[in-house]
Amino acid sequence: MKRSEINQILKNAKAFMAEKQFILPPWSNWSLADWKENKVGAEEIIENMLGWDITDFGSGDFYNRGLFLFTIRNGKFNVDKKPYAEKIMIVEENQETPMHFHWSKMEDIINRGGGNLVIELYNSTPERMFDTTPVHFKTDGVKRSVAVGGKVVLSPGESICLEQGMYHRFYGEPGKGKVLVGEVSMVNDDNSDNCFYEEIGRFPVIEEDEPPLHLLVSDYKKFI
């Protein structure tokens, strides 16, 4: 991805979150000079990969297959005491986050506002394939189930609990607008806990055609 494209996605995301009155922590607006000045005190942010995160999953086509995320809080296995994480995400209409599950993380995905979020579900087999059994889950504490590959549509205010090993992909429902999506989960580890059904790239390769508006979590080691 070009840095100019990433910068524009960041500007659009900030405008949408402001519209929905979702306020990020003050350090979200730090400049590169601020990061360098606060490097020692901000170790948890850097080491636990908190902050801005944009991916096209290696597709080269962010608005068809991609995701905007901001990790607000996160622990780290065997390092600190925090066993939980929280993210805010923006999902465009028909913008796919590819099919995947997590080995260790259980998560709640919450529609925080905007359009509707569509989630497709499968159970996984030990061989990481799609199982043929119905998928059982809870939405806002209520037990539900769908057939193999079934769709769950979350309208604003609704949430779903996704257990370990549960394949899921999601996208914004066409005609309903972009979606502000929250995630509350166990510790998040994008380097080792994701199992995608097909091989993809999680973090973008960036062409530096202009300076970064904000550092992404994948930028920390490069710039700080």
Image (cartoon, grey):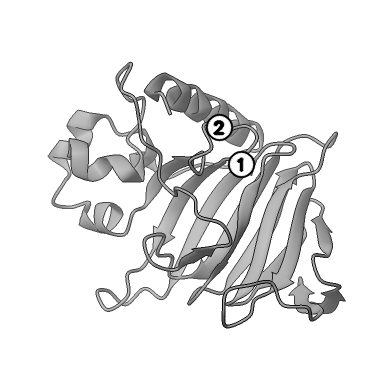
Sequence-wise, the earlier of marks 1 and 2 is 2
Q: Secondary structure at mark 1?
A: strand
Who's the residue at 38% across and 24% down the image? 3
Location of residue 194 in the rendering, given as x and y in whole percent from the top left corner: 48, 64
Please tell me whether residue 136 is drawn above or below residue 18 in the rendered image. below
Q: Amino acid at mark 1?
A: Ile
Who's the residue at 43% across and 70% down the image? 187
Who's the residue at 28% across and 39% down the image? 219
Location of residue 103 in the rendering, given as x and y in whole percent from the top left corner: 49, 75
Location of residue 155 in the rendering, given as x and y in whole percent from the top left corner: 82, 52
| In contact (CB < 8 Å): disc 1 and disc 2 | yes
Q: Residue 36 is drawn in which quadrant?
A: top left
Q: Is residue 129 left or right of residue 185?
A: right
**Residue ranking furthest to the top:** 210
- Separation of marks 1 and 2 at Cα, in angstroms: 7 Å
Mark 2 surroundings within 10 Å by alpha-carbon count, few (fewer than 14), some (14 through 19), many (20 or more): some
Location of residue 50 in the rendering, given as x and y in whole percent from the top left corner: 37, 52
Quadrant occupied by the C terminus: top left
Please tell me whether residue 34 is drawn above or below residue 79 in the rendered image. above
Viewer-closest of 108 and 113:
108
Q: Is residue 73 left or right of residue 132?
A: left
Quadrant occupied by the N terminus: top left
Camera sees residue 141: no
Q: Which residue is mark 1?
A: 90
Q: Residue 122 is drawn in which quadrant?
A: bottom right
Camera sees residue 217: yes
Please tell me whether residue 84 is drawn above or below residue 120 in the rendered image. below
Q: Which residue is mark 2?
A: 13
Q: Residue 22 is drawn in which quadrant?
A: top right
Please tell me whether residue 180 is drawn above or below residue 184 in the rendered image. above
* Number of numbered discs visible in the structure rendering: 2
